[in-house]
Image (tube, rainbow, N blue to C red):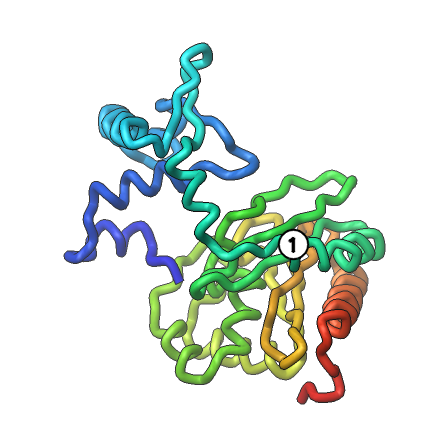
Amino acid sequence: MAASKETRETDPFSVRALVRGLSILGLFDVDHREWTIDEMAEQTGLLRMTAYRMVRTLESMAFLVRDASANRYRLGPAALALTYIGEDNSELVQAARPFLDKLTKETGESVTLAVDIDGFPVCVDIINTSRPFKRRTAPGRILGDLVSVHGKLFAAYKSPEDREALLAEPHPQHTPYSVVDTDALRTEFEQIAHEGVAYDVEGVYLGTCAVGAPVRDQVGNIAATVSVVVPTGRFGPAERQLCTVAVKSACAAFSAYLGWDQSKTG
């Protein structure tokens, strides 16, 4: 999992200038395609002059491009070229769409699809609800850590050794409801692996809850995770049960489509 900002800043082997430059690149996603220098400084907490120097350096290497008419920056060709090196999940996303669409209609809530990329849960697709709700994620964004539904699901199905290695890392307290105690997380992972479902009740963002389940491929590996994301006001006992049943059913159907024999689970 990604180290916290504090850890990155104090790690004697971390290059602070590089950390700060990458924090600027990390601001860009499908919801935030352009930024001004002032906005980047505010979002990263960098001094404006520091942000300016970082941006100019990234611009000189074509990682950022400036729109002179608006004085805003977007990702440049050097950054975009890197996307072609990463794993292509387009086929999985396309195959998942009918199941995600059905899940959204059944629950009336937003749905997220994620895959594990080098130990990080990464959003690869979302379907937004038509009901009032402000999303906090987008395709391409890392979905938190062990506090998030997707982080919990991927961790729960790892080997005991890999799971313990994850538990040994520091876990940020995102909200007062974040579960970060090692023993509590270990117990929760065991329950997730047994029940095949994970929950987040305002652990990552206040006012936002989620329930998710794993998708298995034909040999039983966790190919992806799917979550239903719900505002706290619409996550009472009845809604929680509806979303739980629906997401487990959707993931079971998608797993079967991928070739997994559900009778082998257990």
Taking the spot 65% from the left edge, 59% from the top edge, the residue there is 92
Residue 259 shown left or right of residue 55 in the figure: right
x and y percentages locating residue 195 in the rendered image:
67, 80
Which is more toward the observer, 235 or 106?
A: 106
Mark 1 residue type: Thr
Residue 108 shown left or right of residue 138 in the figure: right
Label 1: few (<14), some (14–19) or many (≥20) C-alpha neighbours in 10 Å: many
Q: Identify the element where label 1 is drawn.
A: strand
Q: Quadrant of residue 13?
A: bottom left
In the image, residue 211 sits, relative to residue 207, either above or below, namely below
Residue 102 shown left or right of residue 76 in the figure: right
Q: Is residue 118 visible?
A: yes
Residue receiving disc 1: 112
Residue sticking out furthest to the left: 12
Taking the spot 24% from the left edge, 44% from the top edge, the residue there is 18
In the image, residue 25 sits, relative to residue 240, either above or below, namely above
In the image, residue 187 sits, relative to residue 52, either above or below, namely below
**Image quadrant for the C terminus?**
bottom right
x and y percentages locating residue 69 in the rendered image:
45, 10
- How many numbered marks have been drawn onto this rendered protein structure? 1
Which is more toward the observer, 145 or 220?
A: 220
In the image, residue 36 sits, relative to residue 244, either above or below, namely above
**Image quadrant for the N terminus?**
bottom left
